[in-house]
């Protein structure tokens, strides 16, 4: 059974077991497909704002994952623009010439600060949604922390994209 078939069955179900359905789809999907589905959920007006959802995943992330997400933002915006975000919290952590945060540095950033960083980054460069989605697609377990509505939107987008193939 291919990804489209799995998604066809899943999207006809209710969102009650969205996390289980998402696990099933994630085993058949590529990281690109997961990232596109997540990006749709992060942009949807049926889910909380992008920054809030990123903060939620960030709060459930390991120090390495936290650093990875923040480094995606840095790579997308560039260190100078990113360091000014969220009251300069990134700028205070980055040493001169440093372009990436370490897990220890990322651990000093709270989920609410990550939420602010993500929201400001989205205003500066809307493409950051795709970059962050691509990163979190590598960590599908964190996507499940967003809840049923976001997962069902992600699954629906994945189905839509799979039907085009």
Image (tube, rainbow, N blue to C red):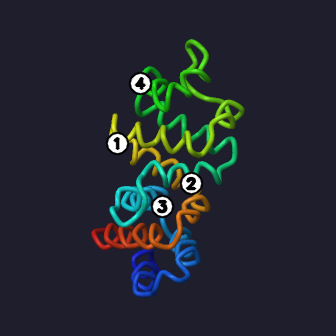
Mark 3, secondary structure of its residue: loop
On the image, numbered disc 2 is attached to which residue? Answer: 56
Q: Secondary structure at mark 2?
A: helix
- Identify the residue position indicated by label 3 in the image: 30
Question: Residue 82 placed where, x, y %?
Answer: 46, 28
- At which x and y percent is residue 111? 60, 45
Residue under circle 1? 127
Closer to the observer: label 3 or label 4? Answer: 4
For marks 1 and 4, give the CA distance. Answer: 14 Å
Q: Quadrant location of residue 89?
A: top right
Among numbered discs 2 and 1, the one appearing first in the sequence: 2
Q: Residues within 10 Å of mark 2 (few under 14, many from 20)?
A: some
Among the two numbered marks 1 and 4 on one chain, the one whose residue lies closer to the N terminus: 4
State whether residue 159 is above or below residue 92.
below
Q: Which mark is residue 81?
A: 4
Q: Residue at 58% of width from left, 40% of height from top?
A: 68
Q: Residue at x 63, y 45 (%)?
A: 65
Report how far apart the C-alphas of labels 3 and 4 lie in the structure.
31 Å
């Amino acid at each position: 059974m291919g990804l489209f078939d799995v998604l066809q069955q899943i999207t006809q179900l209710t969102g009650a077991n969205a996390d289980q359905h998402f696990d099933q789809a994630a085993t058949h999907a590529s990281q690109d497909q997961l990232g596109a589905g997540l990006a749709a959920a992060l942009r949807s007006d049926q889910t909380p704002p992008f920054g809030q959802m990123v903060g939620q995943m960030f709060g459930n992330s390991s120090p390495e994952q936290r650093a990875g997400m923040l480094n995606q933002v840095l790579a997308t915006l560039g260190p100078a623009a990113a360091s000014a975000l969220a009251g300069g919290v990134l700028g205070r952590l980055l040493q001169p010439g440093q372009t990436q945060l370490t897990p220890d540095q990322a651990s000093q950033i709270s989920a609410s600060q990550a939420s602010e960083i993500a929201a400001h980054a989205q205003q500066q460069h809307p493409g950051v949604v795709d970059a962050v989605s691509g990163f979190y697609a590598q960590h599908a377990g964190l996507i499940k922390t967003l809840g049923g509505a976001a997962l069902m939107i992600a699954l629906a987008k994945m189905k839509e994209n799979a039907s085009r193939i």
